[in-house]
Structures are given as structure tokens and as C-alpha cells.
Amino acid sequence: MSVPRARPVPDVFDPRRYAAGVPYADYRLLRDEHPVAWQDEHEVLGWPAGPGFWAVTRHADVVRVFKDSATYSSYLGATQIRDPDPDDLPFIRRMMLNQDPPRHGRLRRLVSRAFTPGRVDRFAALARDRARTLLTRAVGQARNGDGTVDLVAAVTDEYALLNLADLLGVPESDRRLLLHWTQRVIGYQDPDEAGPAVLDETGKPVNPRSPAMLRDMFAYAQQLAAHKRRHPADDIITTLAHDSELAPAELEMFFFLLTVAGNDTVRSAAPGGLLALAEHPEAYELLRVGKAGLPSAVDELLRWHPPVLTFRRTAARDTVLAGRRIRAGDKVVVFHASANRDERVFTAPDRLDLARTPNPHVSFGDGPHVCLGAHFARLQLRLLHEEVLRALPGLRLAAPPQRLVSNFINGIKSLPVQTLPAVRAVRAP
């Protein structure tokens, strides 16, 4: 009896693929037949080819990579698939995201002093009012127009941006800068987000995380910190600006990390969750009538639509993962969305189950780098969904969503929906 041959390894690197949706069928093939698979890092969208990397797609292996920072380093090559310019690497390594224990632990403890649950919870009333105001305006737009509204443009982009600005302490007049920087850094693979690429003297695109491209953001961070020293307030930048243990360069990197990661996590997760509910009206109605709880629903929507698709590590030594030999220096990339659909961990992973428990998704990572702002993100998402349920008796897509061209962020650029009357009959799952 012949043994069936493994099917060819699909390309899950090309960022253009993700504009059509997350390639879950290819992820399943990889999990089943090539759980640690070599991916060619071909030239795409004007960005030069790279050396390639190992794609890690099973949940257990993803968690192992996250937790074993001694073997899978964030520091050696940073955390994006694309290799940074060698001249930029020392600069990029200053960021907490791109460090390994024990240095990572020191920076995490410093920022944790500012990012406390108590401070975050004090923003709950403000965030709820903001969600209600944005949704009221969006519903008004729909009623005065053709009955449709783009929830990204009308609600979720503003909601994420303004909440982050309040938490950081960014003045109202400067808040659009946060969105500009986020689009430039996160959406650099998508011309609609980043605009025309900045080219160097050889005609190649300049990495948006290079020191030259971040100079304006860092200058603003120092100006804001100086302002907060003179005029302290109850916000994160005030706390960081008064921390004598924090060097100026470290404060700049924290501002970069909190601005980009803090904004785009909710900016991507919020419309992704609403898209899932629009595609599953029975689940939306269960939430609306109280037959499903929001805390578990928020985590299931995060499992279903993780805001981050991939993170990179670099092998610090020769090792073996899922039977594949990995050499020191190889890039190892974990795929969050694949791990979240692993049949070895989740029962019926392709079914949206708002009451799913346990739900060990990896949308916020795991190990020493687990997302520091996860509590803040969950709070914002829960409040937003509560207000959506009050404002919109039903959701239906008015047109297909537009997705970000990115193999890093699971972004939704546009989510046109039509509000509907409530569904009359609901059957419990």
C-alpha cells in the first residue's frame, strides 16, 4: 500500500494574498502536512527578496516559540519578517518588543508602572461615551443616506485612535498624527495606507521603521514628555516622563510601541469582530438578546480575527521543531491565525462559538512578550460591542470588506454594513 505524498507547500508569505482574506485552507494544509515549512521570501511590492524563513503553524509549536526566548530570539533580528538594514538593527533593538530577557523584563516592569489596570479602567466611561457618540452619528448617516455606513471610517478607526490618545495624554490638536504614524509603519505594504514608498538613493524602498523615517515621531515624543513634566496629568506619558530610570531613547521607543501597537491592535480587532458578527447574524442576535456573554464573545472574536497575523523570531542556536532542523540564524515566523484554528486544540475551530471555553487563542501572543495592553484592548472591544448591540438591531454587509495588503496586520480598511431589524427567531447553538 503506497503512502500518500505530502502536498506542495503553499506560499503564505505574499502580503497581496491577505487582501483577499486569510488563507485558512493553506494554513490547514501546513498544519497537517508541513507544520514547520520553509517559505521563500520573494521580491514583492518593490521590496527586495530575503533569505526565507520557517513558517510555524500549529498551536503547540507557536506557543513553544513564544515561550522559549533563549532559543527563539526577538533581539537577534527583531520581530518583523523583513530583515532590517544592518545599520538600523542596533537602533531597532532598543525597543522592548525586540529584546530578550532579562533586558526585556526591566523595560516591561518600567512601562507596567504606567499601564496599570486601574488607570485603564478609569477610561471605561469615556470609551463607552465615545463608542455611543460615534455609533449614533453613524446610524444617522445611514438613515440620511442609502441605509449603509462604513463602520471603519465612521466608528472603529476613530474609536481606537481617540482612546489611545486619551490613555497616552496626546492633546486633541495632535491626535491625527497617531493615525498618520500608524498607517506609515503598519500599512507600509499597502499603497492606500502608506502612500507612495520613500526610496533611497539606489531606488529601493526605505524601511518605515528606520531611524530616518521615525525622526519626526521621536521628536514629538520628547516634546510631549517635556510638556508633561511641566503639566503633569493622569496619563501614561506623564508617568514615563517622570520615571528617572527611563532613558530618553527608551521613552522614544515606548512612545513608538504604544502608538503603533496600541492603536492598531484595536483598530484591526474591532472591525474584524464586527465583520464576523455580520457574517453570522444568528450569533449577533444571541449577543443582542443576552443569550451569549460578551467577555467570552470578545475572546472568541479575537480568536476568529486576530489583529496580528505573524511575528518573527531568530534561532539563537541549532534546534529541532516539529521534526525540522533549524539552524542558528534562521528566521522562525509564527502564524497566529493558523494557531487559532488548530483542530488539535480547538473543537470545531471553523465555527464561531461565542461561548467557547476554554479559549487559549494566541492573538495576544504568549510567554514573556504577551501583549502588555491586552486588558485595555479587551475593555475597549467589550464596550464597543455593548454599544453596537444597543445601536444596531442587526448587521448585514452592504459590500465586501476591503482588507489590508499585509502579511503582518489582519487589517480591515472598509466595512460597509446595512442596519437591519432584529432577527425574530433564535435557536441556541
Image (cartoon, grey):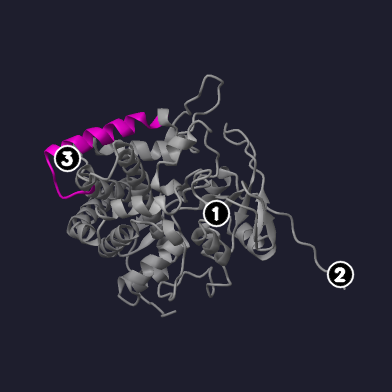
Name which residue lies at 44% across and 54% down: 101
Question: What secondary structure is the stretch in magenta mostly built from?
Answer: helix
Left/right of residue 195 with respect to residue 131 in the rendered view: right
Q: Is residue 71 magenta?
A: no
Label 2 crowd (10 A; few <14 / some 14-19 / many >=20):
few
**Contact check, label 3 and label 2, Cβ < 8 Å:** no
Q: Is residue 223 magenta?
A: yes
Give the position of the C terminus as an image quadrant. Answer: bottom left
Q: Secondary structure at mark 3?
A: helix
Name which residue lies at 66% across and 61% down: 29
The amino acid type of the residue labelled 3 equals: Lys
Label 3 crowd (10 A; few <14 / some 14-19 / many >=20):
many
Label 1 crowd (10 A; few <14 / some 14-19 / many >=20):
many
Task: Please give the residue where the numbered disc 3 appears in the rendered image.
Answer: 228
Q: CA distance from mark 1 to mark 2?
A: 37 Å
Q: Give the camera-side residue of 355 and 108.
A: 108
- In this orientation, does residue 366 appear? no
Left/right of residue 57 with respect to residue 288 in the rendered view: right
Please tell me in which quadrant of the rendered image residue 281 appears: bottom left
Task: Please give the residue where the numbered disc 2 appears in the rendered image.
Answer: 2
The location of residue 207, given as percent across then percent down, is: 48, 33
Give the position of the N terminus as an image quadrant. Answer: bottom right
Q: Secondary structure at mark 1?
A: strand
The amino acid type of the residue labelled 1 equals: Tyr
What stretch of residues is rendered in magenta? 213-236
The amino acid type of the residue labelled 2 equals: Ser
The location of residue 395, given as percent across then percent down, is: 37, 61
Instruction: Name the outermost residue toward the left.
Output: 231
The location of residue 289, given as percent across then percent down, is: 30, 74
Which of discs 1 and 3 lies nearer the camera? The answer is 1
Which of discs 3 and 2 lies nearer the camera? The answer is 3
